[in-house]
Image (tube, helix red, strand yellow):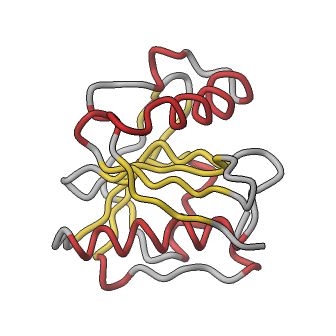
């Protein structure tokens, strides 16, 4: 399947970002809406992946500090092709911004998966919106996209 990948900012695409993130995080995962949206949305750069019908199917944001976050993929599209499109765009964007290290706070149950991508634990686990999270980091030069058997 062909996908359209766009780099967008909050001001021009907030309606698309909000719709998808509310669907995934607020409705599906039942996280509080106030925990999902913050002031960092306005300064971060966002990636949107759309299907051939221009339906927004995935998004993530990259802060200028190198932190990846707010990764949301619509149910039914959580597969290796969408993941590679999304993370490929994030890595390309990070290179263009001369970011040396990617960071993220992942769910504890995905630590092993993120280690397979080149991330290492970089701090103590903590709770965020009722979810146990682990800070991780990865030199951009060490990041590797997974093959199908590494994707959960």
Q: Residue 13: x, y in percent? A: 43, 38
Q: Is residue 127 above or below residue 119?
A: above
Q: Residue 148: x, y in percent? A: 75, 79
Residue lying farthest front?
A: 53
Q: Quadrant of residue 23?
A: top right
Q: Residue 142: x, y in percent? A: 36, 84
Question: In the visual, does 26 lie left or right of 86?
Answer: right
Question: In the visual, does 100 lie left or right of 108?
Answer: left
- Please tell me which residue is depicted at 52% across the width and 53% down the height of the picture: 48
Question: In the visual, does 151 lie left or right of 66?
Answer: right
Q: Is residue 74 above or below residue 114?
A: above
- Please tell me which residue is depicted at 83% across the width and 51% down the height of the picture: 76
- Please tell me which residue is depicted at 48% across the width and 41% down the height of the picture: 133
Position of the C terminus, as image quadrant, is bottom right
Residue lying farthest left?
A: 98
Q: Quadrant of residue 37?
A: top left
Residue lying farthest right?
A: 76
Query: 37 or 105: which is nearer to us?
Result: 37
Q: Residue 1: x, y in percent? A: 78, 73
- Please tell me which residue is depicted at 30% across the width and 85% down the height of the picture: 141
Q: Is residue 82 above or below residue 17?
A: below
């Amino acid at each position: 399947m062909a996908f359209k990948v766009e780099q967008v900012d909050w001001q021009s695409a907030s309606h698309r970002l909000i719709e998808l993130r509310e669907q995934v995080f607020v409705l599906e995962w039942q996280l509080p809406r106030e925990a999902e949206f913050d002031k960092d949305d306005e300064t971060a750069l966002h990636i949107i992946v759309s299907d051939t019908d221009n339906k927004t199917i995935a998004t993530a944001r990259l802060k200028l500090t190198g932190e990846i976050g707010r990764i949301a993929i619509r149910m039914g599209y959580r597969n290796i092709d969408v993941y590679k499109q999304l993370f490929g765009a994030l890595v390309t964007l990070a290179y263009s911004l001369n970011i040396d290290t990617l960071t993220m706070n992942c769910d504890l149950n995905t630590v092993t998966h993120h280690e397979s991508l080149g991330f290492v634990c970089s701090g103590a686990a903590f709770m965020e919106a009722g979810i146990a999270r682990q800070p991780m980091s990865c030199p951009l030069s060490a990041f590797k996209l997974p093959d199908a058997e590494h994707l959960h």
